[in-house]
Image: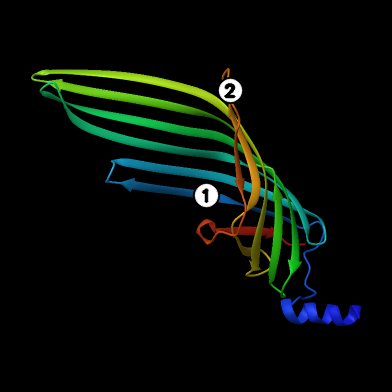
Amino acid sequence: MKKLLLAGAVALFGLSNAQIAKGTAYISGQVGYSQEENNNNDTKVESFRIVPTAGYFVGTNLAVGLGVGYASDKVTKTTTGSVGGGSFVSETKGTQSAFVVAPFVRKYWTLADKLYIFGQLEVPMEFGQFKDEATTTTTLGSTTNTTSTSDKANYTSIGVNVKPGLDYFLNKNWSIEATIGEFGYNTSKLDVDGAKSVNNYKFGLNLSSVTFGVKYVFAK
């Protein structure tokens, strides 16, 4: 009976005997920049992230690793109008920047000689700062007046995520990997008196959040 079940699994998933050996190391990472402009409300959103990653296989098809990097998000909104016979231009900027640390454990299962499916358990942590800036310029006749305000607060964010993915080896040293969605939990809190934690839950495979990466493997 067990042999029949194993044969069925091989037929269904195309499992292979190809394994990633203990002692194999690799380097990878995420680098990304995006910008979105909404002309309907004069809002621009910019995001930047760079997180180099290193991993080491402590057992066959089982790796542990660490990602360390930087992440930044900025939202800019511009508002124009008239007041008291004059005009004004108001610009607000909200910036979130953080130092990122993400230890992880990744388990591989072989689908074919060069194709693997994996599940990654990670604990992402961010130690950063929120900063809000506002500048308003008012023009009345030949008189122009500008006022500015600024406020900032530190924050800490910690999560636990599980990410499924695929890894295809182009050769013994290079592979292309992709993750699809994530399942997890994240909590963040501003470092100010009276601030409450903000909790976020993510469950499901989401094709809109597919990420791709290139990995260099130090093959044994």
Which of the two residues, 132 or 194, is positioned nearer the viewer here? 194
- The quarter of the picture where residue 47 lies is top left
- The quarter of the picture where residue 101 lies is top right
User: Which residue position holds label 1?
Assistant: 31
Q: Position of residue 171 (x, y in %)?
A: 65, 70
Residue 86 vertical placement versus 199 (above, below): above
Q: Residue furthest right?
A: 1
Q: Earlier in the sequence, mark 1 or mark 2?
A: 1
Position of residue 197 in the picture relative to residue 15 (left or right): left
Mark 1 neighbour class, 10 Å CA radius: few under 14, some 14 to 19, many 20 or more:
some
Residue 59 vertical placement versus 86 (above, below): below
Q: Residue furthest left?
A: 141
Estimate the spatial distance between the alpha carbons at disc 1 and disc 2, rounded to whole Å: 28 Å
Residue 51 visible in the shown view? yes
Position of residue 152 in the picture relative to residue 173 (left or right): left
Residue 181 vertical placement versus 5 (above, below): above
Q: Secondary structure at mark 2?
A: loop
Q: Quadrant of the C terminus?
A: bottom right
Q: Secondary structure at mark 1?
A: strand
